[in-house]
Image (cartoon, rainbow, N blue to C red):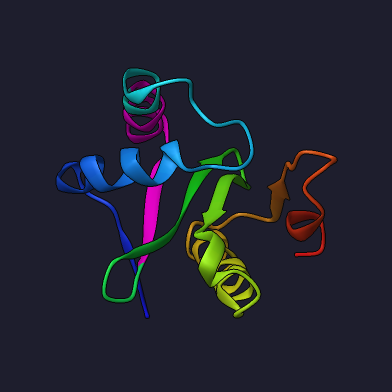
Amino acid sequence: MKIRLASKKDISDLVKFRLKSRYDAPKNKSEAENRINRSFKYSQIYIVVNTALIAYFVVTHKKGVTYLNYIEVEQKNKRKGIGERIMRSVEKLAKDNGSKRMQLAVYARNSPAISL
């Protein structure tokens, strides 16, 4: 499993992945593309790849704070430590960017994300 910064070449895979979301799923492909492109504009998107895309997360750094804006792990790969590994990666990104604090916002009904 490898975590890397996403590029514009990954948009198609990210859109397909985002359309399968269980929380706050886009209504259609166009909306998914808009969300992904907006994330590229204002944040950094990281993808988790095994043989294919299995997770991704979006990070923004502002004024000493690192925000984990979005995290999604493919349903069949949940409960395998991927979220925990992503959190360690975000901690390292925060430290490397000089952030003094991290913030994660989750939906109240998303208990797996709350447990991270």
> In the picture, which quadrant includes the C terminus?
bottom right
Image position, residue 102 (x, y; %): 69, 53
Q: Is residue 103 left or right of residue 16?
A: right
- Range of magenta residues: 34-48
Q: Is residue 27 magenta?
A: no
- Viewer-closest of 57 and 109: 109
Instruction: Please indicate whether residue 116 sits to the left or right of residue 83 in the image.
Output: right
The quadrant in which residue 52 appears is bottom left
Q: Main secondary structure of the magenta part?
A: helix
Task: Write the residue at 33% across / 42% down.
Answer: 16
Q: Position of residue 7 (x, y in %)?
A: 21, 48
Which of the 4 image quarters holds residue 86? bottom right
Q: Considering only vertical position in the picture, is 86 above or below 111? A: below
Between 1 and 61, the residue placed more toward the observer is 1
User: Which residue occupies 71% across, 47% down?
Assistant: 103
Q: Is residue 90 above or below residue 8?
A: below
In magenta segment, residue 47: yes
Q: Position of residue 47 (x, y in %)?
A: 37, 59
- Observer able to see residue 89: no
**Is 19 rendered above or below residue 65?**
above
Residue 80 in view, yes or no: yes
Residue 19 in the figure: left or right of residue 102: left
| Residue nearest the observer in this picture, 87 or 83 | 83
Q: How many marks?
A: 0
The spot of residue 6 in percent (x, y) is 28, 52
Q: Quadrant of the N terminus?
A: bottom left
